[in-house]
Image (cartoon, rainbow, N blue to C red):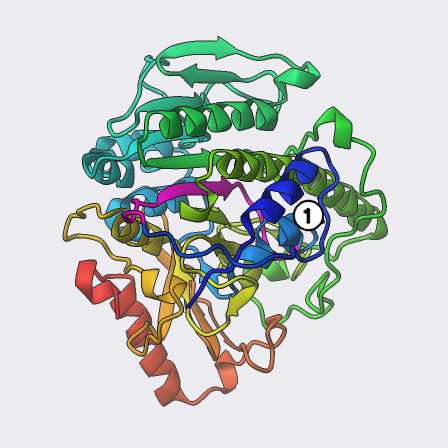
């Protein structure tokens, strides 16, 4: 499979995109001739957004031209828990929350304190760095970081560290603090201090230095956008007027009698609620315009330094978000599709442009083994995820997983989880309430089929769910 990208044309488009003129047209020109030079180890840019649901990503005006038309879109990408810290821990360790034990954003089993106690001892950047890569974290690390009375703390595995001090930062996009290689710097609210733009400058500087030093690199670039409260860059503050939260069939669902109590107890959205939600979605989408600028700048720097064709660029999110579906407003850590499914686009060497994978379910625990394989890094044996590098290359993969689980574990040990396959979503809540949806015929999860389903089928689904929420390592990969 040939990855066809016209290098001069792409670079030109990306330079225009940085100036705000990115277009949606295709790039003309022949594919570059194969090089006789020795194969170089690929670089990695992992761009992780915060609370970006699939439907909002679909509304981003320049994302298709920047990466979608040049890469592979996975339409069945999911997270192991639809909450920031547990999801980020899964990305960095390749483990389910029930194994890495970061179960919440805060509290005794949540956020950075829980991650620091155990999982942080063996993470993706450590493995990649041991393989000879230069590594950088730019942006958000973990909720509650640093919480050690040491704001200069830097975890193992990172050569460059520009991490937001989430424990000290309240506004996220302005008036924030960064630990920059051991020095804590305060930023205000001026236009040039807008956080996404500052992170962009740190990221591009890292890339240029790594290239100049002839080092392969792994850049973990984690934005706050579009997390609430969403504050846009001043240049975007008046754009996208008229944006609405997606009006899907489940939006402000009228009859929720077959749903769990927490949904039944949610009041129907009134016109004022919907107006407010539309304003929130407008603000969220505006913050993503700066992320598009970030992506354009990164791609332009890669092109200018002649490493774009040897760099994998991954665009994804830590979790989704409910935007009025089933009456749930800006809710996550629930089992519904809008919360557990995330955007995922990958471009890079060997990946066919403008392609989609609708068949294979990919999880955030798969990033660590995939990136380890791409970089030649050695991983520990306790990873729950599996590499999808063969899917990136367009190879036929017949032994892929048929289902997956997204879970939430309470401090008392109670488990709520959804078993998701191509055909169904089966949920068991800690409250002992259950749901079953036919995802082929009811993708918006309107009708709960649990009470009318065949008991034998339910028993099979329940057994499989129990198996996955207790799996470890190899037993999680099938």
Q: Which residue is mark 1?
A: 62
Q: Position of residue 35 (x, y in %)?
A: 37, 52
Foreground of the two, 346 or 97: 346
Vertically, is 417 above or below 95?
below
Asked whether residue 234 is in view, the answer is: yes
Give the SS element for disc 1. Answer: loop
Q: Residue at x 66, y 44 (%)?
A: 13
Q: Position of residue 451 (x, y in %)?
A: 50, 82
The quarter of the picture where the N terminus appears is bottom left
Asked whether residue 388 is in view, the answer is: no
**Which quarter of the figure has residue 28?**
bottom right
Vertically, is 373 above or below 403?
above
Instruction: Give the tally of numbered discs.
Output: 1
Vertically, is 151 above or below 21?
above
Q: Residue at x 48, y 66 (%)?
A: 76
Foreground of the two, 89 or 295: 295
Left or right: where 211 falls relative to 62: left
Left or right: where 104 falls relative to 379: right
* Residue 333 is inside the magenta segment: no
Foreground of the two, 102 or 309: 309
Residue stretch rendered in magenta on the structure:
37-55
**Which quarter of the figure has residue 390?**
bottom left
Neighbor class of circle 1 (other Cα within 10 Å; few <14, some 14-19, many 20+) is many
């Amino acid at each position: 499979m040939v990855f066809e990208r016209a290098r001069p044309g792409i670079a030109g488009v990306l330079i225009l995109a940085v100036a705000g003129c990115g277009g949606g047209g295709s790039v003309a020109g022949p594919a570059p001739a194969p090089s006789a030079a020795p194969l170089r180890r690929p670089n990695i840019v992992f761009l992780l957004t915060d609370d970006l649901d699939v439907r909002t990503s679909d509304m981003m005006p320049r994302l298709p031209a920047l990466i979608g038309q040049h890469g592979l879109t996975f339409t069945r990408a999911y997270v192991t828990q639809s909450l920031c810290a547990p999801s980020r821990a899964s990305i960095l360790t390749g483990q389910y929350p029930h194994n890495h034990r970061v179960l919440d954003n805060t509290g005794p089993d949540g956020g950075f304190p829980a991650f620091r106690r155990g999982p942080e001892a063996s993470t993706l950047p450590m493995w990649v760095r041991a393989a000879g890569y230069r590594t950088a974290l730019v942006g958000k690390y973990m909720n509650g970081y640093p919480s050690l009375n040491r704001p200069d703390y830097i975890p193992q595995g990172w050569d460059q560290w520009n991490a937001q001090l989430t424990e000290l930062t309240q506004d996220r996009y302005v008036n924030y603090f960064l630990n920059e290689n051991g020095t804590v710097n305060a930023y205000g609210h001026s236009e040039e201090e807008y956080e996404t733009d500052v992170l962009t400058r740190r990221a591009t500087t890292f890339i240029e230095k790594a290239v100049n030093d002839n080092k392969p690199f792994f850049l973990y670039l984690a934005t706050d956008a579009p997390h609430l409260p969403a504050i846009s860059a001043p240049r975007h503050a008046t754009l996208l007027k008229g944006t609405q939260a997606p009006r899907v069939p489940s939006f402000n669902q009228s009859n929720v009698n077959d749903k769990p109590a927490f949904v039944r107890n949610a009041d129907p959205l009134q016109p004022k609620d919907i107006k407010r939600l539309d304003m929130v979605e407008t603000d969220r989408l505006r913050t993503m315009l700066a992320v598009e600028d970030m992506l354009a700048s990164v791609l332009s720097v890669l092109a200018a330094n002649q490493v774009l064709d040897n760099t994998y660029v991954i665009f994804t999110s830590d979790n989704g978000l409910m935007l009025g579906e089933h009456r749930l407003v800006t809710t996550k850590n629930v089992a519904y599709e809008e919360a557990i499914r995330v955007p995922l686009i990958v471009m890079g060497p060997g990946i066919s442009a403008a392609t989609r994978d609708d068949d294979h379910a990919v999880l955030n625990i798969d990033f660590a083994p995939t990136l380890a394989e791409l970089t030649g890094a050695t991983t520990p044996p306790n990873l729950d995820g599996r590499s999808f590098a063969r899917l990136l290359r367009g190879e036929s993969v017949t032994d892929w997983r048929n289902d997956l689980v997204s879970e939430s574990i309470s401090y008392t040990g109670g488990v709520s989880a959804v078993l998701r396959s191509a055909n169904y979503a089966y949920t068991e809540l800690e409250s002992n309430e259950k749901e079953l949806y036919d995802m082929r015929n009811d993708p918006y999860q309107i009708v709960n089929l649990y009470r009318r389903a065949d008991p034998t089928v339910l028993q099979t689904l329940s057994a499989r769910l129990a198996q996955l929420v207790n799996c470890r390592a190899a037993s999680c990969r099938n």
